[in-house]
Amino acid sequence: MAVRYGGKEDTNWSDGLLISILVRYPEIATINFDPIEHVLKFAFISSQALKTEQLSATAIEGKVLDSIEVFNLLEGRKVKMSAISYLDCDQLTIIEVQRDIDTLAQEEISLIVQLIREFLGDNLVTETDEFVFEDDPVLQEEIIEYMLESMKRANGDRHLFAFREEGRVMVFNK
């Protein structure tokens, strides 16, 4: 998988974090970083339009938000921000999970991805096998955790958008 950076500045912790997450989790279609709110927004794509009742608080929304709350309760953290939104695009649905960086952990990203994967099943749009970067997942997760901890202390001021396309990860400064 190739990585391209679409900006003038050198890559930093925030760029590296977004790249690492997209490389590790082919289920995540895009990631947005909002430096003002200090929030990461993970987008997942369903290859079919989902009905409102499938997305409601009793279905995926409730399951993901409850799981985030319980995970952080067990870790002794109080979540500052967690939300889910949806965008219905005719033949597909985009699910966006928002989390504040200050209380986010790498294990929680794995949990969110697993819950979305279980919920959407074969309808979850992922990078094809030919483009998946094969490396030690444990090492990738350690790198993500390290970069996430570094970002918590950083004062980034760049709105970033990262996505994958045909085996490449691209990061843009919005």
Image: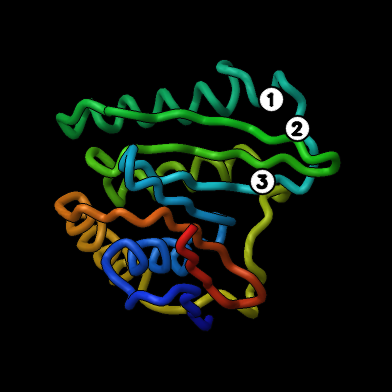
Callout 1: 10 Å neighbours few (<14), some, many (20+)? few
Q: Disc 2 designates what residue? A: 50
149 on left or right of 40 = left
* 70 relative to 122, above or below: above
Q: Nearer the viewer, mark 1 or mark 3?
A: 1
* 55 relative to 94, above or below: above
Q: At 79% from the left edge and 37% from the top edge, which residue is drawn? A: 49
Identity of the amino acid at label 3? Gly
Q: Are marks 2 and 1 in contact (CB under 8 Å)?
A: yes
167 on left or right of 152 = right
Identity of the amino acid at label 2? Leu
Identity of the amino acid at label 1? Gln
Residue 61, image x and y in percent?
Answer: 54, 26
41 on left or right of 144 = right
What's the distance in space between the residues labelled 3 and 2, CA to CA? 13 Å
Callout 3: 10 Å neighbours few (<14), some, many (20+)? few
Q: Disc 3 designates what residue? A: 121
Q: At 63% from the left edge and 66% from the top edge, which residue is drawn? A: 127
In terms of depth relative to the viewer, which is nearer, 114 or 174? 174
Callout 2: 10 Å neighbours few (<14), some, many (20+)? many
Single out the residue that lies furthest toward the right. 90
What's the distance in space between the residues labelled 1 and 3, CA to CA? 13 Å
Single out the residue that lies furthest toward the bottom. 2
Q: At 72% from the left edge and 21% from the top edge, which residue is drawn? A: 52
In terms of depth relative to the viewer, which is nearer, 49 or 122? 49
Closer to the N terminus: mark 3 or mark 2? 2
What's the distance in space between the residues labelled 2 and 1, CA to CA? 6 Å
* 74 relative to 108, above or below: above
Secondary structure at numbered mark 2: loop
Q: Disc 1 designates what residue? A: 54
Quadrant of residue 100 within the rendered picture: top left
Residue 22, image x and y in percent?
Answer: 47, 63
